[in-house]
Amino acid sequence: MNNDELRTLATKRLKARRDFYNYLGIWLGVSIIVIAVWALTTPGSYFWPIWPIGGMGIAAFFIGLDAFGPSRGIITEQAIDEEVARLSRNQTGGPR
């Protein structure tokens, strides 16, 4: 992988991390709003804000996994060559 490809990948990962932190801020803001609405309208009753907070939490998990998880974005020359070979075998009717 050359320097330009590494810089592109690094830029993509840094953007994903920044987006994750932005999402956490939005999640916090939405959580505060729905809890405030619940507290002002029906305090002491069923705590319905758990549903939007939990739903956004699931999304936060996957956004965080994309930002901090293993790098799936690296495609090596060997992987490209193997895919080209596989595709050429499929077109010629060779063994799969």
Image (cartoon, grey):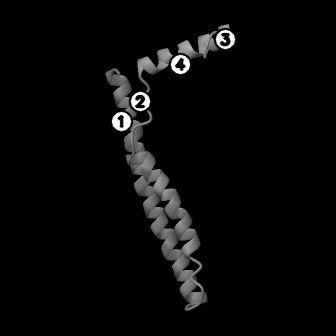
Residue 84 figure quarter: top right
N-terminal label among 4 and 1: 1
Q: Is residue 41 above or below residue 1?
A: below
Badge 3 vs badge 4, beta-carbon distance below 8 Å:
no
* Mark in front: 3 vs 1: 3
Q: Amino acid at mark 2?
A: Ile
Q: Which of 63 and 16 lies nearest the eye of the viewer?
A: 63
Q: Which residue is mark 2?
A: 74
* Mark in front: 4 vs 1: 4
Tell me the CA gap for discs 2 and 1. 11 Å
Q: Position of residue 85 (x, y in %)?
A: 54, 12
Report whether 38 appears left or right of 14.
Answer: right
Q: Residue at x 49, y 52 (%)?
A: 62
Q: Which residue is mark 4?
A: 83
Badge 2 vs badge 4, beta-carbon distance below 8 Å:
no
Tell me the CA gap for discs 2 and 4. 15 Å
Q: Position of residue 80 (x, y in %)?
A: 48, 18
Q: Residue furthest bottom?
A: 44
Q: Position of residue 31 (x, y in %)?
A: 50, 72
Q: Residue at x 43, y 63 (%)?
A: 25
Tell me the CA gap for discs 2 and 3. 26 Å
**Secondary-structure class at tag 3:** helix
